[in-house]
Image: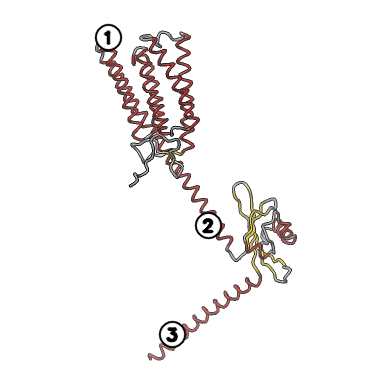
Amino acid sequence: MNAPNRRPAFVCDEADDSGFIQPCPFSPGYRIAVAAAWRSLLVYECYRLILAGILLWLFYARLNHQVLGTVDARLFQATTAGYLLLVLLNGVTLLRRCPGYALQAQIQIFIDIVAIGLLAHASGGPQSGLSILLTVAMAAGGLLVGGRCALVFAAIASSAVLGEQFFVQHLNNVFDGRGYTNVGLQGAAYFAIAVLAFVAAKRTEQSDALARQRGADLTNLQQLNGHIVQHLQSGIVVVDDQHHVVTANRAALHLLNLGATPASLDVVSPELLEKYRYWLTHPREDYTTLDRVSGNRIQVRFTRFAAASRDYAMIFLEDDALYNQRVQRSKLASLGRLTASIAHEIRNPLSAVNHA
């Protein structure tokens, strides 16, 4: 019996059928659009590349030698160089989009936490100020990965800062409660930033989903309207302010003896164009008739409507014979209702006489 197919962990395309990515394995309900996800990851990669270059340049230029690498210059140099190489390698995998987005984003955040922790240790611990760079990594974790993974990253960063503080004080054989207070506040800030970034990303994702749903509803509504217009018995021709025909349904093409939608109204009928121009100058006279080659007349009605920044005119066409038939049926229906009403009025007095 064949084993069921399993999705490999190392994949280059992890988007589902709807074009979304689930970056956090602990939060399957959180998804990011593919294009937006890779674009955000590219922006973060550019930030990491600039950060690594600036740190390496500051170290070798000795412009800030009192802070960077004061405790262990070799560790700072090796960490910065290794971080730059890893960032360049991440850039190659990012351009190839292999491995998948979730794995790349998680690896980049984890590398930043480890690298910044080592740089802070080489520069004197949390007091060096380099730990503040972890806030950017936490924000990136909330935006790029999101879900419970953002809290995991915040927990790792807080543990790294707390462990660094404990190691520094143990190495110096001193205890300073203020240092632990500062580290605790930093850890709380990491969690707060991660949660806020995740909430912001979640709201953005919900807004995008709502926009996509409204776009799909609008497309369906347009298709439904087009279907209804095409199957109307009355002919409809939509004309823009330049007398160009925007659309015409089947009934209009049949009444005007056209095989396809013409480009302009003068191609449809010079007589119709003349009546249309007359209506533009006399908008109250919106009813007219149009003679056909077969001898029948076409009832024509003009109306105007605005869409976006342009004005359009809608021309309703109806065969005179069909129009007269509908008028005749309407008259017969009215006559039938009148007859029934008269019969009812006559029946009431007769019923009273019979009872008497």
The residue carrying pointer 2 sits among few (fewer than 14), some (14 to 19) or many (20 or more) residues within 10 Å by Cα, namely: few
Frontmost residue, 208 versus 238 = 208
In the image, residue 255 lies at what x, y percent? 67, 65
Question: Depth-wise, is mark 3 or mark 2 nearer the camera?
Answer: 2
Residue 3 in the image: state x and y as whole percent.
Answer: 34, 44
**Apparent side of residue 175 relative to residue 152 in the rendered image (left or right):** left
Can you give x and y, in whole percent of width and height, for residue 263 in the image? 70, 54
Q: Which mark is residue 224?
A: 2
- Going by the numbered disc 3, the residue's amino acid type is Asn
Q: Quadrant of residue 7?
A: top left
User: Helix or strand or loop: what does disc 3 sit on?
Assistant: helix
Label 1 to label 3, Cα distance in Å? 113 Å
Q: Label 2, secondary structure: give it.
A: helix
* CB under 8 Å between discs 1 and 3: no
Q: Residues within 10 Å of mark 1 (few under 14, many from 20)?
A: few
Which residue is identified by label 1?
A: 172
Q: Position of 343 compared to 111: left or right? A: right
Asked if the residue at tag 2 contacts the one at tag 3, i.e. Cβ–Cβ closer than 8 Å, the answer is no
Disc 3 from disc 2: Cα separation: 50 Å
Looking at the image, which is closer to me, 6 or 325?
6
Q: Which residue is mark 3?
A: 348
Which quarter of the rendered picture does the C terminus lie within? bottom left
Choose between 280 and 324: the one closer to the eye.
324
